[in-house]
Amino acid sequence: MSQGIHTISGRLGAMCLAVAMIAAWVTDAPAVENGADVPPEIAHLIAFVGHSGCDMDRNGSRHTAAEAASHLLQKYRRAKRYAPDAEQFIARIATGSSLSGKPYMVYCSAHPPTSSANWLRSELVRYRTEGDKGLP
């Protein structure tokens, strides 16, 4: 009987850990807004991606806005020494695959597909001019 309880307890613990990890991954994009280790303009751009409702194509695979933001945050945290400011973040991290060299493309329902570089540069200019006005 004791053996069965330990097995159930172990499985339950593993399931709780898995759920916690998934929850952290899914909510990572919005959490960047409060991330102390991410400069404000870069945090804004990542949050903008996450809240955009647009898909991002990376290496031929479409990803949701939340998945794209999570990917960019992970990529930034691994390579932030190469991106001390928002311009370098866009140029070196958020525009394409570091493995294949293929550019990231953004698909928003109301607009034709565009490169993530152009899309993010436009948002950075808007953000510097207007701030967070009109964004969730």
Image (cartoon, helix red, strand yellow):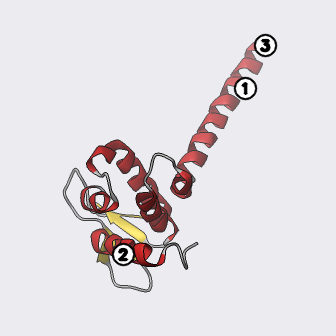
Question: Of the residues shown, which amino acid type is indicated by label 1?
Answer: Ile
Question: Any mark on residue 125, and which?
Answer: 2
Counting residues from the N terminus, which is met first, the one under dot 2 or under dot 3?
Answer: 3
Q: Residue at x 34, y 74 (%)?
A: 119
The foreground one among 131 and 80 is 131
Choose mark 1 or mark 2, whichever is in front. Answer: 2
Counting residues from the N terminus, which is met first, the one under dot 1 or under dot 3?
Answer: 3
Q: Residues within 10 Å of mark 1 (few under 14, many from 20)?
A: few
At numbered mark 3, what does the secondary structure look like: helix, strand or loop?
helix
Query: Is residue 7 found left or right of 60 in the rendered image?
Result: right
Q: Is residue 62 above or below residue 18?
A: below
Q: Are marks 1 and 3 in contact (CB under 8 Å)?
A: no
Distance (Cα) linking label 1 and label 2: 54 Å
At numbered mark 1, what does the secondary structure look like: helix, strand or loop?
helix
Res. 114 visible in picture: yes
Q: Residue at x 55, y 79 (%)?
A: 134
The foreground one among 98 and 92 is 92
At numbered mark 2, what does the secondary structure look like: helix, strand or loop?
helix
Please state the horizontal and vertical placement of residue 97, each as a whole percent of the image: 25, 56
Question: Of the residues shown, which amino acid type is indicated by label 2?
Answer: Val
Distance (Cα) linking label 2 and label 3: 63 Å
Q: Is residue 107 above or below residue 28?
A: below
Query: Is residue 114 found left or right of 47 in the rendered image?
Result: left
Please state the horizontal and vertical placement of residue 103, each as a whole percent of the image: 24, 65
Q: Which residue is mark 1?
A: 8
Q: Which residue is mark 3?
A: 2
Res. 64 visible in picture: no
Q: Residue at x 62, y 35 (%)?
A: 17
Distance (Cα) linking label 1 and label 3: 10 Å
Question: Of the residues shown, which amino acid type is indicated by label 3?
Answer: Ser
Quarter of the figure with residue 123: bottom left
Quarter of the figure with residue 49: bottom left
